[in-house]
Image (tube, grey):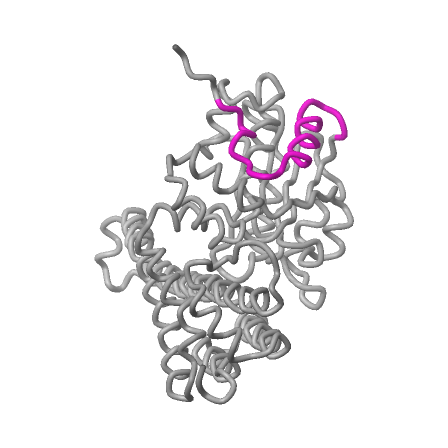
Amino acid sequence: MTTATRTVWDDLVGQRPTIEVLQQAAAGQGMTHAWLITGPPGSGRSNVARAFATALQCELRTGCGACEACRLGMAGSHPDITWVKSETSVLYVDDMRGLVQSAAKFPSIGRWQVVVIEDADRLGTPENPRTGNALLKAIEEPTPKTLWLLCAPTVRDVLPTIRSRCRTLTLNTPGTEDVARFLASHDGISETVASFAARASQGHIGRARALALDEETRSRRREVVSIPARLTSLGSCMTAATNLAELAKEETEAITADAEKRELGELQAIFGSERKDLASRSYRAALSGLEKLQKQKAKRRVLDVIDRALMDLVSVYRDAIALSVCAPGMMVNEELRGDVATLARAATPDELLRMIDAIFTAREQMLEFNVPPQLALESMTVALRLPGGRP
């Protein structure tokens, strides 16, 4: 008995209306040269872009999943699909200019030259739009066989001059049941673990898979969501802030260690014996540039890890509000019902809302205003201290 081939669309969770639009476009109906795919973290922007880019190259124009073009596209190795993902806080103008030049070439084996920019929100700001301006002309006057797919959390995160020239698709946050079914069918996860991971991830597919498959990820999350009930004194607030920063640093180091070692090895291979010459200016300059880039990547990864932890914290306070007002349905942190009840007894719904505001303020301070994480987290945890200093 043969197993039916999965199409490129099969792993997109909770996005049926969007899939139908893109399937029609891949078949030639409603096609345009620039698309902006928006949706909250974890909604699957990159996965949708990958499926669409692959379907555009598909020999059957359907995203069949079986042809050579589909296999190459889904593996990320199709020569006519270019992926741009920033591991720093911004996309750089020189890199974008080079991308625009290469994107103007005709496809080598496919029907389109497709460029996917995963972090279009990092193309600049209205006050400093240089990187976006480097892309603007290519989108305004595209070559006949070039197609741009831009991804961002919201339309507002993209420069107005860019977004006004794109067709926008907004993704939904996948429902808990959809995510749980995906984990069970795709990864063979048990119903109990799949249900927990789907709730805890709040619709974030990648996060849900990590929680379902990795005990260390689950352990780190348990540490984070247990913080609110422990914030009963100034000392506990300072300790919690330090622990959050340390958890983020440890997770980032685990992610970056192998990547940095590989990047250094690649650089040394490029320069060969020349790197052994301490007087080699070119090697020292390249090494300095690599070290600078690695520091920028590490800084961004720390912020991304902290950001995810903050969203986990928000889920605890939202659960407390839901419990206070007797809202129906299962909580995100059902396993922490005791801690959530402690918060609900210690603070009113209005006070809990102000605590959520404090979390988002810390997030904004770090991501937008470059406040050192330790300082922002200390200010946040003090604002989260339980009224009266005890449960």
Q: Residue furthest front?
A: 326
Residue nearest the observer in this picture, 365 or 351: 351
Q: Height in image: 370 above or below 138?
A: below
In this view, the residue in front, 224 or 138, is 224
Q: Which one is nearer the viewer's eye here, 159 or 242?
A: 242
Classify the position of the N terminus by image quarter. top left
Left/right of residue 40 with respect to residue 242 in the rendered view: right
Q: Position of residue 116 (x, y in %)?
A: 58, 41
The number of numbered badges drawn on the structure is 0
Horizontal and vertical percent for residue 335?
A: 41, 59
Q: Is residue 294 above or below residue 144?
A: below
Span of residues in magenta? 6-30
Q: Tell me: 149 left or right of 247.
A: right
Which residue is painted at 62% across and 67% down in the image?
Answer: 325
Q: In the picture, which quadrant includes the C terminus?
A: bottom left
Q: Quadrant of residue 349?
A: bottom right
**Res. 358 image quadrant:** bottom right
Q: Is residue 257 left or right of residue 173?
A: left
Vertical placement of 237 versus 170: above or below? Answer: below
In the image: residue 112, left or right of residue 24: left
> Residue 25: x percent and y percent?
70, 28
Q: Residue at x 53, y 73 (%)?
A: 344
User: Where is residue 204 drawn, in percent x and y?
Assistant: 51, 50
- Residue positioned 35% across, 74% down in the render: 243
Q: Is residue 289 magenta?
A: no
